Amino acid sequence: MLKKLVSYTIVLFTIFSCSNSENKFSQLPNILFAIMDDVTYMHMGAYGSDWINTPNFDRVAAQGILFQNAYTPNAKCGPSRSNILTGRNSWQLEEAVNHWAYFPVKFKSVAESLSENGYHVGYTGKGWAPGVAKHEDGSPRDLLVHRYNDIKLTPPTPHISNVDYAANFEAFLKDKEEGEPFFFWYGGLEPHRGYEYGSGIAKGGKQLSQVNDEAIFSFWPKVDSVRTDLLDYAFEIEYFDQQLGIMLDQLEASGELENTLIIVTSDNGMAFPRIKGQEYEYSNHLPLAMMWPAGIKATGRKVEDLVSFIDFAPTFLELAGISEENSGMEAITGKSLTEILFSEQEGKVTDFRDQVLIGKERHDVGRPNDEGYPIRGIFKDGMLYLKNFKTDRWPAGNPETGYLNTDGGATKTVVLNSIYSPDTFRFWNWSFGKRNEEELFDIKSDPDCMRNLALEEEYQEILKEMRMLLLTELTEQGDPRMFGKGDVLESYHYADQDGVNFYERYLNGENVKYGWVNQTDFQDLDKIETYQHLKNGSNSVLLNKK
């Protein structure tokens, strides 16, 4: 206890001695970081959704700031959370570049740093996951310090977590010393798959007619099973939002709301084909709202700056009065968002937040030798440029092993079945077919990323500029792929021992676990290639010329 008080006093002295911060707030702020599991940005009421009800997210946005262009560098649970906790891009994180990684000892998380500097730190639900983290001596390590998951409830469906998020948050607050600032991570496991099929209608009171054709992206068939799947997704988002609302009430009742920075976001896009685990607009563009009554004075703003998840860690450190040098963390690439928080402007607040880098290596296994699908990309000036390094590989995983980088569900089943007819083959191809080495999209006019401008003559100059900018940035950040050392990123071992060498074990007849996809997701590659519409190289390289 004495150690905690001494540390807290030192931090207070630091922040009050800093002329840059002393007029912004009178005490160290609390931080509530609420993160959904697999939500694309537009599926919040504040962004205009009329078939998903999110009154508490909308409240945070209305009483704070709604970010219009927030992106994760890597659209998969583990890597995205690694970006948040370290302030570094995936290609700067060694083993943690991958999903189901062994987290390197050398990278201290921002939560660990806050804990060491006077903050009461904890989390409920899903923290940094999935993966394995250990201390240098081999003992278990929790990157979010203290877990609060003991209090349970009966969820509305078997696929919704039985962790009582709000009750565990209340327990966390009771453990806090009076006057002690806190950092709490509310990691909802919703709307991660699976879903109880039809729950949105049966238990959420929704109707198929609410999901009109415009709500179904152009790369999915507009059929009722997809509408039903989307309503089940909506039902789970609303559950997360309800728990958030209880937490806001708890903060208000305890007198902590005024000085708590509340951040609500998601880790990656929705768990549907061509989105989660990929690197397109809907994969990486995520909801983000921030509210802080004592700190954000110009509320109700919509900010257009491009912000990255690597910007969270330096923001937390600055607000806590902890310098990067004293944080114990490795060098941070992201930039603090405080100039946006304390600004009175809306729209574009800064000049330098005009681009975001994205990319991935290995997500879920299912290719020979546990290979990944390496991509790098950049969002800038309303454009998205992507470089696919291994175009001979299947982007979402091999057909024979169930396309393991796309979670199983009703929409995936519909899209997979579309391969069997020339009239619907395009849907399979857009989500699961092989890709061009370079892709270029105009996000403003084509957010679905359907028209690959890299194939068009009039866009070659823009293509060249985007390519060079990306390569320059990646070189400055030390990306191994820029130095001919990309293989090291694929050499890191997959931490889930049940899934290691999945491809080889499955094809050898072993009963390997694959609980996140359906049995019907596995497709016979030889049989697929006998279909007339797949002959003569009719893959995405040709079809994307539309």
Image (spheres, rainbow, N blue to C red):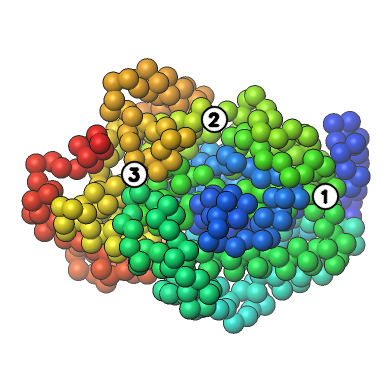
Disc 1 secondary structure class: loop
Rounded to the nearest angstrom, the CA distance separating label 2 from label 3 is: 23 Å
Can I make out residue 30 in this image?
no
Q: Which mark is residue 293?
A: 1
- Per the image, the residue denoted by label 2 is 355
Q: Is the C terminus in the top left, top right, bottom left or bottom right quadrant?
A: top left
Which percent across, then down, holds residue 418?
23, 58
Q: Earlier in the sequence, mark 1 or mark 3?
A: 1
Q: Which mark is residue 373?
A: 3
Q: Earlier in the sequence, mark 1 or mark 2?
A: 1
Q: Residue at point 22% right, 54% down?
A: 424
Left of 213 or right of it: where is 156?
right
Query: The residue under label 1 is which amino acid type?
Result: Pro
State the image quarter where residue 517 is shown.
Answer: bottom left
Between tags 1 and 3, which lies in front?
1
State the image quarter where residue 69 is shown.
Answer: top right
Rounded to the nearest angstrom, the CA distance separating label 1 from label 2 is: 29 Å
Q: Earlier in the sequence, mark 2 or mark 3?
A: 2
Give 111 or 33, whichever is nearer the viewer: 33
Query: The residue under label 2 is which amino acid type?
Result: Gln
State the image quarter where residue 520 is shown.
Answer: bottom left
Which percent across, then down, holds residue 545?
24, 34
Q: Residue at point 47% right, 35% down?
A: 444
**Mark 3 Cα-neighbour bin, 10 Å: few <14, some 14–19, many ≥20:** many
* Picture layout, residue 276 above or below residue 87: below
Query: The residue under label 3 is which amino acid type?
Result: Tyr
Left of 528 or right of it: where is 445?
right
Disc 2 secondary structure class: strand
**Mark 2 Cα-neighbour bin, 10 Å: few <14, some 14–19, many ≥20:** some
